[in-house]
Amino acid sequence: MWIRFINLEYKAQRGTVDILPKDQNLWNYVQQQCFDVARSFGYSYIETPIFEDSRIFERTVGEDTDIVEKEMYTFTDKGGENISLRPENTAGVCRAFIENGMHNETLPARLFYYGPMFRYERPQSGRYRQFHQFGIECIGDSSYDNDFEVIKLAWNIIKKFQIKNTELNINSLGDSKDRELYITKLKEYFIKYLNDLPKVDRLRFERAPLRLLDSKEEITIKISEEAPKTLDYISTESKIHHENILYNLEKLSDLDPGFKYKTNDKLVRGLDYYNKTVFEYISDSSGPQGVILGGGRYDPLIKILGGQDTPAVGFAMGVERIINELKKVDIKEKNNLDIIIVVLNDDLRINAEQLSDSLRNNHIKTIIAPRRSMKAQFRFANNMNAKFAIILGEDEIKNNVISIKSLNSKKDQIEIKNDDIEKIISLINSED
């Protein structure tokens, strides 16, 4: 019987979700694929705390950004420290890089992370207040080869998930001097239309003019069409850096027909620490603005946090958006449970316990069916989506055998020696 409780007093907070057992296979699949691709490129896992000194985000993400002004979960702890739940993890990884002296190790440091982030924003499809990100950080080398490596790594992940109609958008913001010059030119252009801009974008004009280019306001989008382009104001060195990346992308496109890219002169990304390369992978089916993942180069960030001048590049990917994409297609998930032991006599349950211990010690996921009739135990096994049922009765115990039956095919039930673990493993693998 299906029972649903109505008018619960306690519910998950708005913008958060429970990841239930029925969804774990998909979540584990996404995490494993990301980890496997990262490791295949020589990256190592790093884990940082979910909360940091608020100043870390104020200094790196930018005090005038929506993230810091409106979206961070910030509080004063019992020791009087101003703490924020992390809204992103690049700043935290860079803090860990500095604090743990990783600049003394062989560079570049190739790092990846996975975990929950927190932003107080309007919940919508693929966007939550607690959400998960997978990210890549390549720290300690300014070469365009590393920009290309990070972009290619991201593409390999997207291919793993078979996300269709995906295109790389790429731009360059130049170095810090280029950026200052461009902002001056941008303000000279937009000041002519200042009275036409909505209030939110008039504030951006004063505090963060680059963000006018990624405004969602229709009038601002229209005005931006004739705005100056970043690539017209970057230095020769920045231009060479960018052109070398484009050359590599063209070669990748020749080798991999599925790879598509374009230069997007309006792409600036939403965080203050970016310079030179910025990029996003965009799908036409992935919800608001279609962004699957985004990143870029952030050479100033580690110095801003008090470290040495250390170039770096990386990206972050929203896991929930990938999950939503995968739910749109028919993905056959592996059965989570290998064996259900059906016990025909309650006196034999101690034998079932011994058998289950042996199976689990060999990494075979096993459950003993509850004390019910044989028919009810088989129904339980089917409901649990197990691959096999092992039948344990007095005859099996007497003859030192087990009877094993596939629950996913019409193959006949067979008998094998009760200690023939290799045979059981072989049968399980044949069902994958």
Image: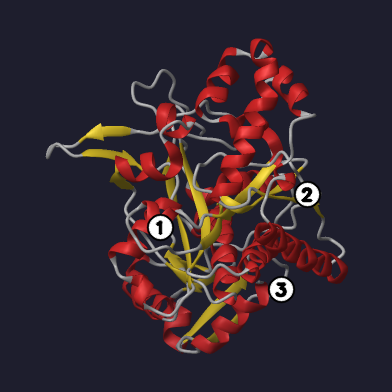
* Residue lying at 82% horizontally and 70% vertically, measured from the top left: 251
Q: Residue furthest top?
A: 195
Per the rendering, the mark at residue 209 is: none
Q: Identify the amino acid type marked 1.
A: Ile
| Element class at badge 1 | helix
Local secondary structure at mark 2: strand
Which of pointers 2 and 3 lies earlier in the amino acid sequence? 2
Secondary element type, mark 3: loop
Q: Is residue 417 above or below residue 22?
A: below
- Toward the left, the furthest residue is 79
Residue at 35%, 71% (x, y): give it.
102
How far apart marks 2 and 1 lie (CA) works out to: 27 Å
Report x, y in % for residue 307.
34, 61
Q: Residues within 10 Å of mark 3 (few under 14, many from 20)?
A: few
Residue to which mark 2 is pinned: 263
Q: Nearer the viewer, mark 3 or mark 1?
A: 1
Q: Is residue 159 left or right of residue 320?
A: right
Residue 95 lies in what quarter of the image? bottom left
Residue tagged 1: 302
Which corner quadrant holds the C terminus? Answer: bottom right
At label 1, counting other C-alpha atoms closer than 10 Å, the crowd grade (few under 14, some 14-19, many 20 or more) is many
Nearer the N terminus, badge 2 or badge 1? 2
Q: Is 420 positioned to the left or the right of 11 in the image?
A: right
At a point 75% along the width and 61% down the height, the residue shown is 243
Task: Identify the residue under disc 3.
Answer: 411
For marks 2 and 3, give the CA distance. 56 Å
Tell which of 222 and 10 is nearer to you: 222
Q: Quadrant of residue 152?
A: bottom right
Q: Residue at x 61, y 49 (%)?
A: 294
Amino acid at dot 3 = Lys
